[in-house]
Image (cartoon, helix red, strand yellow):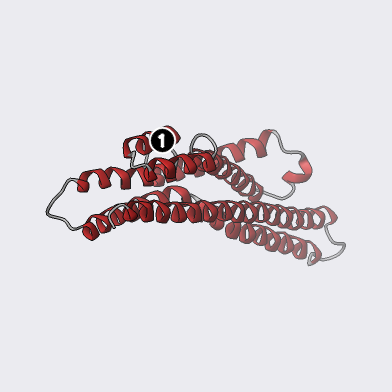
Amino acid sequence: MKQGSLNFIIIFGAAVIGWAIYEFMMPQFIKDGGQLVIGLIALSIMVLTYVIERNLSLKKAGGRGPMAKFLKNLVQNVNSNDIPAAIAACDQQRGSLANIVKTGLERYQEVGSKKDLTKKEKMEEVKRVIEEATMLEMPILERNLIALSTIASIATMWGLLGTVLGMIRSFAALAKAGAPDATALSLGISEALINTAGGIAIAIAAIVAYNFFTTKIDGMTYMIDEASKDILMNLSSKHE
C-alpha cells in the first residue's frame, strides 16, 4: 500500500473514531469544548497510531538478535574471506544494516571475478552499491516522522482556534444587554480551556515521540555508516 493511501486511511479512520468517542464516550465537561474536540481526539489517535507504527518498523529494522554479536560475526567472516557465511549471517539478521551489507557483499562477489576491472574500480563499485542501498533504507527508517512533526504544529493551532472561538462566545455572553448569560459565559470559557489543554497535550506527546524516534534513527544511521566503512576497509585490505 502506498504511503499516501495509508495516511488517508489513518486520517479518515481517526476522524470517524474521534467522532464516535466524542458522541458516546466523552464526559459532558469535555463535550463542553465543542465540536473541535473531535479534531483533538482524532489527532491524538493519529499520534498513537504513528508511534505504534514507528516502534514496530524500527524494531524490524534493528533485525534479529543482538547487533553487537552480528557485527562481530560479520567482521570475522569477512576477515577470513568467507563471504558466503557473511551473506548468510545477513540473511539471518534481516535488519536494515544487514540488508545494506548484504547488497555490498553480493556485489563484491560479482565483481571479484571480473578481469576487466582494476582492484580500485571493484571497490568503488562495492562502495557505490552500499551507498545506494543506504539511500533506499533511510526513507523506511524516517517514514512518518514528518507526520508526527506536522501533528504537533496542527494540534497547537487547533487548540488555539478552540481558544479563540471560546473567547468569542464568552465575550458575546458578556456583551448582552442586562445581566450576562452565565451559562453561555461558562461554556465559552470551558471551550477555550479544554481546547487549549488538549492541543498542548497532543503537541507535547507528538514532539516527544518525534525527538525519541529521531534520536533512535540517528543512532542506527551512525551504526550503519560505521559498519559499512569497516566492511569496506576489510574488503579493500584484501586487494592491497
User: Callout 1: helix, strand or loop?
Assistant: helix
Amino acid carrying label 1: it is Ala
Place of residue 14 in the rendered image (x, y in percent of width and height, measured from the top left): 55, 41
Side of 146 where 105 appears, left or right: left
Q: Which residue is mark 1?
A: 89
Side of 40 where 30 appears, left or right: right
Of 109 and 220, which appears nearest the observer?
Answer: 109
Task: Work out which residue is located at the far right of the displayed protein and give it.
Answer: 179
Side of 181 where 101 appears, left or right: left
Location of the N terminus by quadrant is: top left
Residue at image point 37% right, 42% down: 80
* Few, some or many residues within 10 Å of mark 1 (<14, 14–19, 20+): some
Against 92, is 192 above or below?
A: below
Of 231 and 90, which appears nearest the observer?
Answer: 231
Residue at image point 34% right, 38% down: 82
Place of residue 16 in the rendered image (x, y in percent of width and height, measured from the top left): 55, 38
Location of the C terminus by quadrant is: bottom left
Task: Work out which residue is located at the far left of the displayed protein and give it.
Answer: 116
Against 179, is 7 above or below?
A: above
Residue at image point 64% right, 49% down: 40
Place of residue 38 in the rendered image (x, y in percent of width and height, measured from the top left): 63, 45
Residue at image point 81% right, 58% down: 185
Side of 139 where 178 appears, left or right: right
